[in-house]
Structure formats: C-alpha cells, structure tokens
Amino acid sequence: MKPYIERASAAGPEWVKSSYSGNNGNCVEVAALADGGRALRDSKDPSGPVLRFTAGKFAAFVAGTRGGEFD
C-alpha cells in the first residue's frame, strides 16, 4: 500500500490507511476523488458512511492538524 495518494483511480477510490495506524482496527482511510477532493472512512466499516471534502477544505484540515489546531 502506498503511503500517499497520487490521484483518483478510474476504477473507483483507492483507499489508503495511515502508516501510523496500528493493528487495533481503529483506523481512518483516505481516498483521492476525481475532482481533486478527498474522502475519509472508518476502516472497520468500509461500506459505511464516507466524509467527502473539497481539495481546499482538506488542505485546510491538514494544515490545521500540522499546526496543532486540534491538539
């Protein structure tokens, strides 16, 4: 599994789990969307709900996480 997402696949989203995830099953997966946005889901429930973000909103979330906004 790649540690990052390059682009959306024509066959559907390619879900990637964080390299920081352990084997306890409490993981979030992310996928690139065709429009440049991102989708997030719970790895324990792959057919469950998916959160979708525009590219700008996801970039703001990542920047906030890196900046300690959610600590």
Image (cartoon, rainbow, N blue to C red):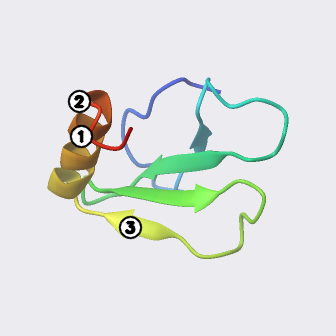
Q: CA distance from mark 2 to mark 1?
A: 5 Å
Say which label, 1 or 3, has the lower sequence index.
3
Q: Is residue 60 above or below residue 11?
A: above
Do the numbered discs 1 and 3 sit on residues whose CB atoms are within 8 Å? no
User: Where residue 9 sits: x, y (%)?
Assistant: 46, 49
Residue, disc 2:
67
Q: What is the quadrant of residue 17 in the picture? A: top right
The residue that mark 3 highlights is: 52
User: In the rendering, at what x and y percent does residue 51 appear?
Assistant: 45, 68
Give how far across and how far down residue 68 sits, in percent. Answer: 29, 32
Q: How far is disc 1 from disc 3 in space, using C-alphas?
A: 17 Å
Horizontally, is 24 left or right of 4 in the view?
right
Q: Residue furthest right?
A: 24
Residue 20 in sight here:
yes
Q: Nearer the viewer, mark 1 or mark 3?
A: 1
Inspect the image, locate mark 2, and give the three-letter code of the amino acid beneath it: Gly
Q: Secondary structure at mark 2?
A: loop
23 relative position to 38: left or right: right
**Amino acid type of the residue tagged 1 in the rendering:** Gly
Q: Amino acid at mark 3?
A: Arg
Q: Residues within 10 Å of mark 3 (few under 14, many from 20)?
A: some
The reply to whether dot 2 and dot 1 touch (C-beta < 8 Å) is yes
Q: Nearer the viewer, residue 66 or 57?
A: 66
46 up-or-down from 28: above or below: below
Q: CA distance from mark 2 to mark 3?
A: 22 Å
The quadrant in which the C terminus is found is top left
For the residue labelled by badge 1, is the local secondary structure a helix, a strand or a loop?
helix
Label annotation for residue 13 = none
Q: Is residue 46 rendered to the left or right of residue 65? A: right
- Which tag is nearer the camera, tag 2 or tag 3? 2
Q: What residue is disc 1 on?
A: 64
